[in-house]
Every structure is written in structure tokens, then in C-alpha cells.
Image (cartoon, rainbow, N blue to C red):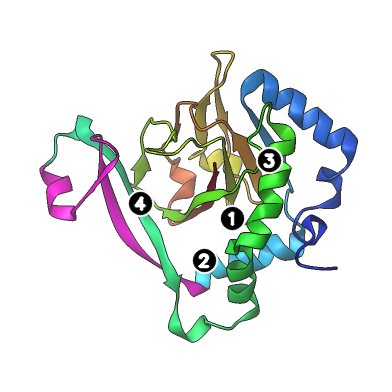
Amino acid sequence: MQQLELAYWVAEEHLTASRVNEYAERFAEDGLVYLDGFLRREIADKLAHFVAHEASYSPVYGAYQNDIKVSAQEWTELDDQRRFFHMSRYQGPKPEFMMTPASLTYMRFQQRPVQCLFARYAASLTPNPPREMLCQDMLLTALREQQYLRPHTDKGTGVTRHVCIVFYLSPDWLEEDEGGLNILTLRGKTLTLSALFNRCIIFKPNLLHSVAPFAKSAKGKVRYSQTIWYA
């Protein structure tokens, strides 16, 4: 199976015409759709291994002021109401894991030709997509206890984002661990979607969303997520 075919990456059940039509209807109603077991298990396992064991991260902090990033010192001095996020952001593969199967899978996953496949899939679910929807940005994060991402939208600055896709990549994450995505749908209903392994959430960037606090059962766990924006 060729890597430049969507079926190489995505589980077959999510590629049938009937499923795509079903997802498109749900997206039109709520502005979002969540798909469990979205990636082929072999792909999901390699990505999960990479993000947990072979990737390097550094802490980042943000304030509610044009989504501005601030230093750790500035963040500690902020009033709590102005604190927007505190998380760990992907910096690259660790030097000793540059050419492992998991690392190579992640690097291919990031490449433009593969992202074009996912862009076309997302476009097939969304009403009135642009003529050519492309990957605008991506972010891999690790979220631990006491870290957070507070309410916001992903509309972006200086660019019109049409859709956002989040992939959850923590195999040990359970529903009772909480830490799910709180999101306000087009119908005005707030949903909390668990960050279950190999769950994919596709949503409109203008929907208000945040990450729910972790439960005690998540102690010592890391919530890995890959977010991709398409414009």
C-alpha cells in the first residue's frame, strides 16, 4: 500500500462513501465530528511510540493577549485570569531516534503530500470548502498534571482557517481520566469528548473549546495530541 494513499494512514471503515456522507451530515449540524479508531492501528501505534518515547518537548506558556507566548517568569507574574495555556510543545526527535521506524512514520505524516490527503478528506466533510485546502500549521503537545489549555477559538490571525483536526495519541488514556475536549457546538450544546487513543476530532476552528482538568486517575499520565489546521 502506497504512503501517498489515504488508505495507508486511515482505517478502511472511515473511507466508505456511506461513512463519509454520515460524517458530513454530523459536521453540518454540530460543526464537528469525532471518529474512533481513525488511523490504521499500525500507524497509530508508531505515532504513539514516537510521541511518548522518541520526541523531545519544552514547556511553553501563553497569555490571553492575542494568544501571546510569554516566558516562565512572565507567566508566574500574570494574574490567573490572564493565563491562557501551560503545556509542553514538540521540539523535534531526540538525536538518537532520528531514523527509527516510529520517527520516520511521524516525519512522513507531517509532510505536505500526506497532509494534502487529510486536507481532502476534511474538505469532503465540510460545507463550502475552499477550492484547495492545505495544511496551514500543526502542533504536537504533551499535557501533564497541573498544565492546561483554557477556552479559546482557533480562528487564527491573518489567515482563514477552515477546519481543525486533533489526533489523540496516548494508549493508556481512559475515559475516567477526564482531560477531554470541551467544545461548544454550532447548536449551542457543550460536549466533552474524551482524549481516547486513536480518536480523531474534526471541527470548525471558530468553535469555543478548551481542555478539561485531569481526574486523579490520570496522575502520572501524559495526554499527547497532534493538532493540524487547514486553510
Residue found at the very far bottom of the displayed protein:
96
To which residue does mark 1 refer? Answer: 169
**Cα–Cα span, label 1 and label 4:** 16 Å
Residue 227 visible to an observer of this rendering: no
**Cα–Cα span, label 3 and label 4:** 27 Å
Residue 89 visible to an observer of this rendering: yes
Residue 104 figure quarter: bottom right
State yes or no: discs 2 and 1 in contact (Cβ < 8 Å).
Answer: yes
Marks 3 and 1, the one that precedes in the sequence: 3
Highlighted range, magenta: 54-77
Q: Is residue 64 left or right of residue 121?
A: left
Q: Position of residue 43 (x, y in %)?
A: 71, 63
| Residue shown at 72% from the left, 33% from the top | 125
**Cα–Cα span, label 2 and label 4:** 15 Å
**Cα–Cα span, label 2 and label 1:** 9 Å
Q: Nearer the viewer, mark 3 or mark 1?
A: 3
Instruction: Report the disc number at residue 87.
Output: 4
Residue 62 belongs to the span the image colors magenta: yes
- For disc 1, the neighbor class at 10 Å (few under 14, some 14 to 19, many from 20) is many
| Residue shown at 76% from the left, 67% from the top | 3
Disc 4 is placed on an element classified as: strand
Residue 90 figure quarter: bottom left
To which residue does mark 2 refer? Answer: 52
